[in-house]
């Protein structure tokens, strides 16, 4: 479930309907890593080791050795 509203923060909930009851499996506020794209997770880890970076998306892809990723994915 995607939750968006004027008076709430954006959030994603993973729910399961079981035995006529909705169960919360995951919440993006409490477990943001579960809702992150794999590329974002990899870049986050890479940036921790790099520290700072200045350049184009193409330069970043080359620096952190992201294979099969195009610069438009990072835009």
Image: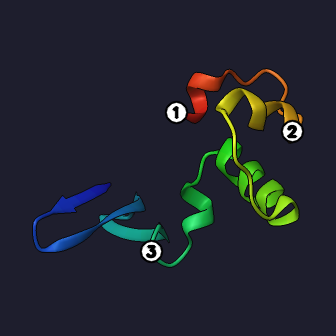
Q: Estimate the x, y position of residue 21 in percent, counting from the top left.
A: 32, 69
Q: In this orientation, which residue lies closer to the viewer: 15 or 33?
A: 33
Point out which mark residue 58 bears: none
Rounded to the nearest angstrom, the CA distance separating label 3 from label 1 is 24 Å
Label 2 crowd (10 A; few <14 / some 14-19 / many >=20): few
Pointers 2 and 3 in contact (C-beta within 8 Å): no
| Quadrant occupied by the N terminus | bottom left
**On the picture, is 57 further left or further right than 3?**
right
Helix, strand or loop status at disc 1: loop
Where is residue 73? Give x, y as percent: 59, 28
Residue under the image location 72 percent in, 26 percent down: 58
Of labels 3 and 1, earlier in sequence is 3
Numbered circle sitting on residue 63: 2
Residue identifier under label 1: 75
Instruction: Give the residue drawn at x 72%, y 58%.
Output: 44
Mark 1–mark 2 distance (CA, rounded to whole Å): 16 Å
* Left or right: 16 as drawn, with respect to 69: left
Residue displayed at 50% across by 79% down: 30
């Amino acid at each position: 479930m995607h939750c968006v509203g004027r008076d709430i923060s954006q959030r994603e909930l993973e729910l399961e309907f079981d035995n006529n009851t909705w169960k919360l499996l995951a919440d993006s506020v409490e477990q943001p890593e579960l809702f992150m794209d794999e590329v974002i997770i990899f870049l986050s880890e890479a940036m921790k080791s790099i520290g700072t970076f200045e350049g184009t998306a193409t330069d970043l892809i080359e620096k952190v050795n992201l294979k099969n990723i195009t610069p438009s994915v990072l835009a």
